[in-house]
Amino acid sequence: MRHVKNRRSFMKSAAIAGSAITLPALQYSRVYGANDRLQIASVGTGGKGWSDLLGVAASPQVEVAGLCDIDSSAKHLGQAADRFTAARQYDDWRQLLDESSDLQGVLVSTPDFMHAPISLAAMQLGKNVFCQKPLTHTVLEARQMRRAADKFGVVTQMCNQIQSHSAYRTAVHLVHEGMIGKVREVHSWQGGQPSWPRHIPRPSGNDPAPANVRWDLWQGVAAERPYKIGMYHPFNWRGWQAYGTGQLGDFGCHILDPVFKALEIRSPTKLTVDAPELLPETWTDRATVQYEFPGTKYTAGSTLPVTWYDGVGVSPPRETLAHIPSDAKLPGAGSVLVGDKGTLVIPNVAMPQLYRPDQSVAADLPVIPSVDHYTQWADACRGMGETTSHFDYAGPLTETVLLGTIGIRFPGQELQWDAEAMKITNHTEAQQWISKPYRKGWEPNWI
């Protein structure tokens, strides 16, 4: 295990946005030869990071050259080091980037709040990036990720991997082929039971961090707080506002993804949220977010209402779901697109169902095969094909999700969104949540 001593920092020393060192806008991507192997590193090797790493490394054209995790235990850095024995090992991602000029790609599979700081630093060094969803922790970070990907000419992919599954690809195809006509409204939901803390106060006291955990490094850009057993690392961070984005952030970039792809929407113009009052540090038990988007060539009107619901057992009101029989069972999570020629039910990771106006279920629908979301990125890094969840697409999707988390802080209040100006135009207090403060010495280098 390597520990940081003297290293240059990729974080700016001033907290003033725009004061970062300006790097040259070079094009780093290149076409690889048939015998070249893509040199990658993974930051975050446990949990989802482990499956991400195995997914990308499944390509014979990929070589794992670096591994980084603040947890050296068998379920984190240990298992990755045992599998990829030639890879350099680190506990600090800044040192990894300092010492890895040979890398062409970086996987970022950390808690939400560290996605952007690590990814931005990597892109500024010309590294291609594969980043977990939601793409970022704040709206400003999402916009910065889009700008960086464009400025430095790198290949990017957000890991909303269900996008590449046959189920979601088929749903998008059915809409594009006009099978349900023009869409007039959308309902999306997640009715599952989160396993992480929510709607609770911060626990008091302090526990010693395990010897295998670098708690100082885990906290990264967030304000320092005492370690507590089982509260944050390795998984329960999702329920804490300082680290995660709650149920909407956890699932929105999956469930809303085929809605965005099928209807080619990008940014809402306004939203209103129904949710309980937040406690100071954790996310709520439930929320309903009503978005309004500009219409597209796939929608019935000049605007499109999209409603998100989350909470245990929640689903859309049946009276809003035209063409679906009242006794038809809805999935526990998914989307319904109500069109003028039919209604499409898109379960979360299951094949879609198309209901006709007479409430019958359409049979013999075309099926679009899956693609590999992981090797798609690896291939694109080598100059073969393109990614489908690149940051220019994933950025607006993530911004929409994160605007919903801002709305959760102001229930019952309409927030009007000017995407071009990146501004909530009618609510000064809500606008302050577009960004966040960063721990001194850990501020990202803005583009």
Image (cartoon, grey):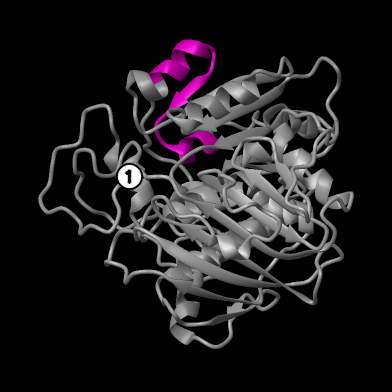
Residue positioned 58% across, 35% down in the render? 107
Horizontal side of 156 relative to 274 (left or right) equals right
Residue positioned 45% across, 54% down in the render? 314
Q: Is residue 1 visible?
A: no
Q: Position of residue 363 (x, y in %)?
A: 80, 36
Q: Position of residue 190 (x, y in %)?
A: 49, 50
Q: Position of residue 404 (x, y in %)?
A: 51, 66
Q: Quadrant of the N terminus?
A: top left
Q: Is residue 80 magenta?
A: yes
255 versus 429 height, above or below? above
Residue 7 or residue 191, whichever sits in front: 191
Horizontal side of 145 relative to 376 (left or right) equals left
Q: Look at the image and give the residue range highlighted in magenta.
A: 78-98
Q: Residue type at mark 1?
A: Trp
Q: Position of residue 418 (x, y in %)?
A: 66, 79
Residue 45 or residue 224, whichever sits in front: 45
Residue positioned 43% across, 69% down in the render? 408
Q: Is residue 358 magenta?
A: no
Residue identified by numbered label 1: 196
